[in-house]
Amino acid sequence: MTLRDVEAATNKEVSNAYLSQIENDKIQRPDPNILHALAEVYLVRYEELMELAGYITPSKEGRGADERHGRVPTFAKLNLTADEEAQLLQYLKFLRSNKK
């Protein structure tokens, strides 16, 4: 499919310009809504695209408590760095521990 074909298949929800930026690594973490639209067009699992974009990690048995739980992150639209996200999660852990 060409980029314009994909744009048409998503009812212009994903522009060919945006797709081009993804292909050229100018956008490294596409919006989860975009990934959902692309999953439907390419017939791939949405979760797989979310993993590839770095939003979620594959679920593993026996993973540590600090690893992600597989849900779409709350801060996805903020395009946080991994370090920023880790700091926010630590702060959330701190807030929750103070409630007890």
Image: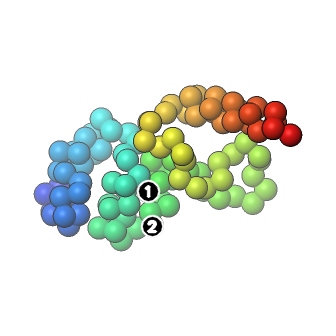
At x 69%, y 36%, the residue is 92
At x 61%, y 55%, the residue is 70
Considering only vertical position in the picture, is 5 above or below 90?
Answer: below
Please provide percent x and percent y for residue 44: 40, 67
Residue matched to label 2: 45
Name the amino acid type tagged 1.
Leu
Indicate the secondary structure of the residue bearing disc 2: loop
Name the amino acid type tagged 2.
Arg
Structure colour scheme? rainbow
Considering only vertical position in the picture, is 10 above or below 94?
Answer: below
Please provide percent x and percent y for residue 9: 20, 67
Residue matched to label 1: 49
Please provide percent x and percent y for residue 21: 25, 41
At x 69%, y 45%, the residue is 67
Find residue 66 and report its image quarter.
top right
**Are the residues at dot 2 and dot 1 in contact (C-beta closer than 8 Å)?**
yes
